[in-house]
Image: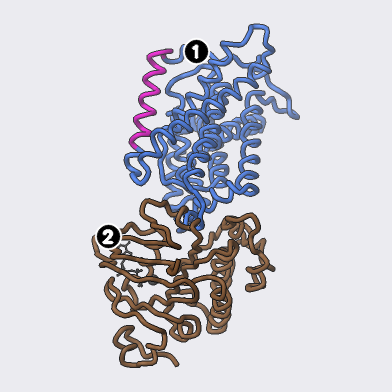
Chain colours: A blue, B brown
Amino acid sequence: MTIFLSLTFAGLALGAVYFLAASGLSLIYGLMDILNFAHGMFMTLGAYAGWDLATHLPASTPSAVTFALEVLAAVAGGALAALLTEVVFIRPLYGKPLSQVLVTIGLDLAVVALLLGGFGANSLSLPVPLWFLEATHVGSVLLPNADFVALVGGVVVLVALEWFLRRTRFGIVIRAGVENREMVSALGVDVGRAFTLVFVIGGAMAGLAGLLYTAVFTGDLLSPLQGDGLLIFAFIVVVIGGLGSIRGSAVAAVVVGLLQDYANYYGGQHAGFSEIGNLSTVLLLALVLEIRPRGLFGRAT
Amino acid sequence: MSHAIELDDVHVSLGGSHVLQGVSFSVPTGGVTALLGRNGVGKTTTLRAVMGLAAHTGVVRVLGHDTRGLAVHRIARLGVGYVPEDRDVFAGLTVAENLRLAERVEAPAYDDAFALFPDLAARVRQRAGSLSGGQQQMLAIARVLLNRWPLLVVDEPSKGLAPKLVGEVAEALARVATTSTILLVEQNLAVVRRLAERMVVLDHGRVVHQGPVGDLDDPDLTRQLLGVAAAR
Ligand SMILES: Nc1ncnc2c1ncn2[C@@H]1O[C@H](COP(=O)(O)OP(=O)(O)O)[C@@H](O)[C@H]1O
Ligand SMILES: [Mg+2]
């Protein structure tokens, strides 16, 4: 039972990171019909932006302050990368969806190559507070502190995003645009501004996802390839949850996170098969596509 | 400015078929002009070309402005409200959110819209997707009334509505027509006679007749143009 609870907690933490990675992807696809392969790059750049900022801080900076600043840098870095991507590469190709997808793939490959050339693979370590490596007793269960951090990050962003989408005019424009972009512009609304905004929001969340993933799941090692690794699961989460649905992404992210953790532990232990977490995720994807091709929360159009 | 809309030799091709083949006509400012024709002759496509939603050649002038090179939202902001054929209210948004999205002026005319459609006022928190077809049509019309725009482009507002609702919607449009110019596509000829003063008839992507709505009194002409007997 204790193991089950720890696994559940770790799965929720992983789900939180998947949610951060997937929700922006889902909004971008829902509003603009773009499969944004550059999303992995936003995550990676977010993590590197956090690391870069930390290297410029005086050694006396308290570790909690350092981490808070890393988070800000990751969010800003991801948002900036997304802003430039949308304005410089996506916007001129409006109306050519295939070219847009190809340009995001090209950007991602180029940035990964640049980071590999500049820093090598797994050579950098992100400073995190020592407290992250400790654990807290909750009842009889010992839960890793780092998992709390990921979980809090995911929940805070989910609540903020829901608030933004429901309560602000821009949020209403985005939700309406996901349903019927053409009609939104026929009402006199400049949908192009909403495009830029979803990219920036998606990039900010991706940057945070990249940083939290490094801080919580990779033993603090930065890798130029981590974003693309996460991106695959983010795409799976988006498809399972339903394209364009934030709640769908949240539910699917938690389901996939839990499934991976359970399968890896129980499957790995009993079947001696280490890739079983990934395999079960793909099987779940196939099952959902078979039963509900539009995903759990996808609306028929 | 004597014309609210002018089309000059407008061509549209969709999926390889030449849907509008040089459409030219003008909509005078004030009152209702009906755009008529059998199913599939290009009425909806014409309205979409006016809104910039259908790529076209030729010239469309809206409220005196040449729309070539204007994005759809810029055309709408010239002062034209669009009520599309299938209403296209945003199903996942509430009635209030649908209306808020359409606000383009400092003081939107909610009083006007709710006076015309009191049913909507009671349902502002309801999701538009859960409204009846008639209520959705009312919402689609209310949405374009908020800005008191001088021109409305309305595509088959009575389609799929129960007879009683058809009367209500026609009544509402009649009142709107006292202050705005309306270009109306409508299959229900009783509604056309009630609302419109002038008509333009399309066939196979071309204008084949223009004149006063009284021309519908000629049963032979009506049958020839529309393939139906004129309602009295
Ligand atoms: N996306 C499309 N691709 C190909 N043909 C289309 C498309 N949309 C409409 N059409 C055709 O264009 C013609 C005109 O359509 P439309 O303007 O909707 O007619 P109406 O509103 O008069 O019934 C029809 O014959 C229709 O089949
Ligand atoms: Mg039509």
Quarter occupied by residue B61 = bottom left
Query: Residue A271: in sight, yes or no?
Result: no
Q: Circle 2 sits on which residue?
A: B15
| CA neighbours of label 2 inside 10 A, class few (<14), some (14 to 19), many (20+) | few
**Is B22 in front, or is B118?**
B22
Asked if A188 appears above or below B219 in the picture, the reply is: above
Q: Residue at x 50, y 19 (%)?
A: A48
Asked if B226 appears above or below A256 in the picture, the reply is: below
Query: Residue A248: in sight, yes or no?
Result: yes
Residue A22 magenta-drawn?
A: no
Q: Position of residue B102 (x, y in %)?
A: 57, 58
Query: Is residue A221 left or right of B50 when viewed as pictured?
Result: right
Number of the label disc, if any, that sits on residue B171: none
Give the residue type that dot 1 points to.
Leu
Q: Residue at x 30, y 69 (%)?
A: B23
Q: Circle 1 sits on which residue?
A: A124
Query: Is residue A209 left or right of A140 when viewed as pictured?
Result: left
Q: Position of residue A94 (x, y in %)?
A: 37, 43
**SS class of the residue under badge 1?**
strand
Give the residue type that dot 2 points to.
Gly
Mark 2 residue's CB less than 8 Å from ligand 1: yes
Boundaries of the magenta span: A102-120
